[in-house]
Amino acid sequence: MDSPSRSSVIIIGAGVSGISAGKVLAENGIEDMIILEASDRIGGRIRKENFGGVSAELGAGWIAGVGGKESNPVWELASQSGLRTCFSDYSNARYNIYDRSGKIFPSGVAADSYKKAVDAAIEKLRSLEANLDGEVSEQPCSPKTPIELAIDFILHDFEMAEVEPISTYVDFGEREFLVADNRGYEHLLYKMAENFLFTSEGKILDNRLKLNKVVRELQHSRNGVVVKTEDGCVYEANYVILSASIGVLQSDLISFRPPLPRWKTEAIEKCEVMIYTKIFLKFPYKFWPCGPGKEFFIYAHERRGYYTFWQHMENAYPGSNILVVTLTNGESKRVEAQSDEETLEEAMGVLRDMFGPNIPNATDILVPRWWNNRFQRGSYSNYPIISDNQDVHNIKAPVGRIFFTGEHTSERFSGYVHGGYLAGIDTSKSLLEEMRKQKERESESQAFLLEPLLALTGSLTLTQTEAVPSLHKCDIPTQLYLGGQVPCLFGILEVIVLGIHVMLANWGKT
């Protein structure tokens, strides 16, 4: 069992928010921190796995928001690290929509369907706003045909996870780049960690980072926080930065003693959790169209989101012969619950609809399971289209000495890697400010206690030297304490000194 020696700060979670928070704390002189990570690696929902000879990004895969007037901080980190990326152009995907017979919908039909879907999305937003204002408005028609369902999926589950104008594109630009580097997206986190954790040959060896530590309980009071892990370890700190995902906060993995206030739990429950599943398929050779405008293609099916959005990896990794299909939410949960063999059979059925019965079988499949991962419970936060900003503020707001961070605490960039990165920086700065204020309060309290003591000491110096110049309190008979002025003053002094010792002892624990 680890020693319960007290730290200044415990960071729970070593994803992008936890690592960026730790870096800022270290830069401001907070060295006695501990990072508790539930898994056997850093990165959180940034995770790579070797598949088919390349690095498959199971979680975050793109740097979104590039090319604008303001530079995306994650893009800056990638540039500094020489991370290899590949530009992604989704605009042609709507013209690569296959029906179940393998025919591509005419571009005119696809463009018209796309325009109708965008108009319907805008109308739905206006309708929701009108209903909030007490007005009654007619709801737009729901998509019904396979192509309508496919485009609706692309707009709402893939392209537009938030209401336009999208802050990321407004601030940083509208271009997106796929990470295509065998070191993985997580390489950026290791480079950040090098700034404040001891590393050697790309491995973190600093004992302040503790892996496989599953936090199960947080006991918090005005004097500090006690953290208990699943393996029986206990850690104490003045403050905690909690970077667990919104899905974990909604689960029962971590208990709080005392429980979180109602305003906090209600805000947490209101935030939706998106599940985004990228299924990787390896083939002996490529049989799909390549070339300009062919990277992304769409399958139109009667069931919305059924193996809808496809991408080939030839641009990122030429010769890899890998396809990726993206599922979300309900379809993700369904696929996570079945075997990989069943998923492979379904995916091959869809590919044969599009490209014919003679295509080869996939030689391997990789299916991430973000929903069933108890350390993640989903892929990213997704606030309702019409939501109260107060909910975001309440999710982010600290509770006593527990500070919350993560992409779900970012008001402008929730759901993005840069949102998580900036949230960690923002939270650590808020904590540093609170620590500064706490020191000021302690200094004021100490001065308040010392003031009467100093005044009393001065008074005693005058009276004692004149009345009893060589007197020590231990030499005074006990009965004199009841009637003499000088012994009474010594009694008061003793109480004040004892009180100061108690206060200083308590401060040492905070």
Image (tube, helix red, strand yellow):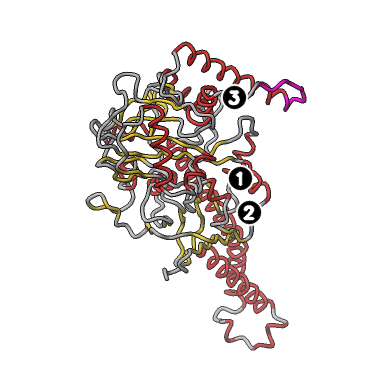
139 drawn magenta: yes
Q: Position of residue 311 (x, y in %)?
A: 37, 30
Residue at the top extreme?
108
Instruction: Determine whether the residue tagged by mark 2 lies in a helix, strand or loop.
Output: loop
Which marked residue is nearer to the observer: mark 2 or mark 1? 1
Instruction: Determine whether the residue tagged by mark 1 lies in a helix, strand or loop.
Output: helix
Pointer 1 or 3: first along the chain: 3
Provide the residue span drawn in magenta: 131-140
Disc 3 marks a residue whose amino acid type is Lys
The residue that mark 3 highlights is 144
Q: Name the quadrant containing residue 294.
A: top left
- Whether residue 167 is visible, yes or no, is no
**Residue 29 falls left or right of residue 109:** left
Disc on res. 268 = 1
Residue at 31% in and 18% down: 292
Q: Residues within 10 Å of mark 2 (few under 14, many from 20)?
A: some
Looking at the picture, does residue 305 appear above or below residue 211? above
215 drawn magenta: no
Disc 1 marks a residue whose amino acid type is Ile
- Depth check, front residue: 34 or 43: 43
**Residue 293 falls left or right of residue 128:** left
Disc 2 marks a residue whose amino acid type is Leu
Looking at the picture, does residue 165 appear above or below residue 187? above
Looking at the picture, does residue 351 appear above or below residue 23? above
Q: Name the quadrant containing residue 314.
A: top left
The residue that mark 2 highlights is 260
